[in-house]
Image (cartoon, rainbow, N blue to C red):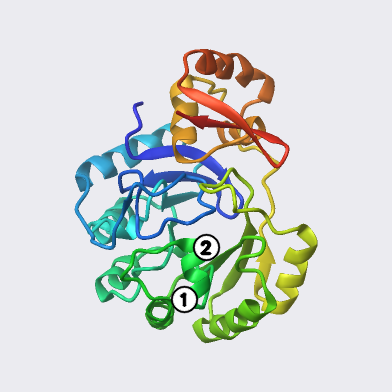
Amino acid sequence: MQHKFTFGPVNSRRLGLSLGVDIVPGKFCTLDCIYCEAGKTTTRTTTRQEFFNVEEIISEIDRAISEYPDIEHITISGSGEPTLNRNMGKIISEIKKHINIPVAVLTNGTLLNDPDVRADLLEADIVIPSLDAVTQETFKKVNRPSPDLQIDSIIEGLKLFRKQYKGALWLEILFVEGINDNDDELLKMKEIIEQINPDKVHINTVVRPPACAIARPVSEQRLIEIQKILGDKSEIIGGVTSKHKDRHETNSQSILELLKRRPMTLNDIAISLGVDSADLEATLNKMLSDRVIKTYLFEGKEFYQAI
């Protein structure tokens, strides 16, 4: 099948076999994070729009579910900020009406001070907002926000959402070496986290090629120190090493849909598609020669990315 809105399924570190659903054009976002694996933001905005036809999105999800019945989560994420889609609540509601698979939403959390956005997310089973900084100065350095965004307002939105939301709230923090990993920021962050009261705090760092070369990963030892500072709810996100049920799918379109959203290593692709790495090499080499993908090194690993 042709994929306009869905990608994967991807073997997620947190959500198992996850069907990705992309509901905004790439790359519409409220931020232009220096670490973003989807590349630099092309349209930075806080204005919500009706980007796509809801029925088309739901129809494609239905077809993907029938093709891959072992999907564990439907994850609204992708190459931009999903809450910018004004129909997000309707999309989640339509999924929940007839598909018995949990819905997760990955969001940068910047629009949660809008009551309409909070209402749109209430039917989701899991919401995973980001909070990479708690001071405006650091927020600007790491996330490069739209000019009208203030970190205090974003934090207040997270607190209000936590009071309304009955599902699982997992807060994600991505640390960049020398920018948001100092002790002063961490102690303020710990205080804010306690006020938000999420169910979990996921600690992450730069693991794929970032939008800006200055975004460097925090060391494993520093991540351990950060986890101790942030407390018992925090956990360091590890990589996925096992693959889901074999799909024997090595066609270039499936690979390209993955690489449009994020750079991946050969092993990442193999895990996501449920195949052996050796079965991918011929297809990847053909895609390289056709110049639809490229490779480059990051932290000593070779990554593939759509051109």
Pick the front one: 181 or 247: 181
Where is residue 21? Give x, y as percent.
Answer: 38, 46
Q: Secondary structure at mark 2?
A: helix
Name the spot of residue 34 as percent of width and height, x first.
51, 54
Indicate the quadrant containing the N terminus: top left, top right, bottom left or bottom right.
Answer: top left
The answer to whether residue 195 is left or right of residue 275 is left
Residue at image coords 67%, 54%: 217
**Which mark is first along the chain, 2 or 1?**
1
Q: Residue type at mark 2?
A: Val
Q: Residue 101 appears at what percent x and percent y?
A: 43, 52
Q: Residue at x 66, y 71 (%)?
A: 234
| Residue 65 position (above or below residue 181) | above
**The C terminus - image quarter:** top left
Asked where in the image residue 221 lies, by quadrant, the reply is bottom right
Q: Which mark is residue 49?
A: none
Q: As drawn, is 187 to the left or to the right of 158?
A: right
Tell me the amino acid under the disc marked 1. Gln
| Residue 142, label in figure | 2
Name the residue beneath numbered marker 1. 136
Q: Nearer the viewer, residue 243 or 85?
A: 85
Determine whether 98 is above or below 247 in the image: below
Q: Position of residue 75 (x, y in %)?
A: 44, 51
User: Toward which corner of the image does residue 103 lie, by quadrant?
Assistant: bottom left
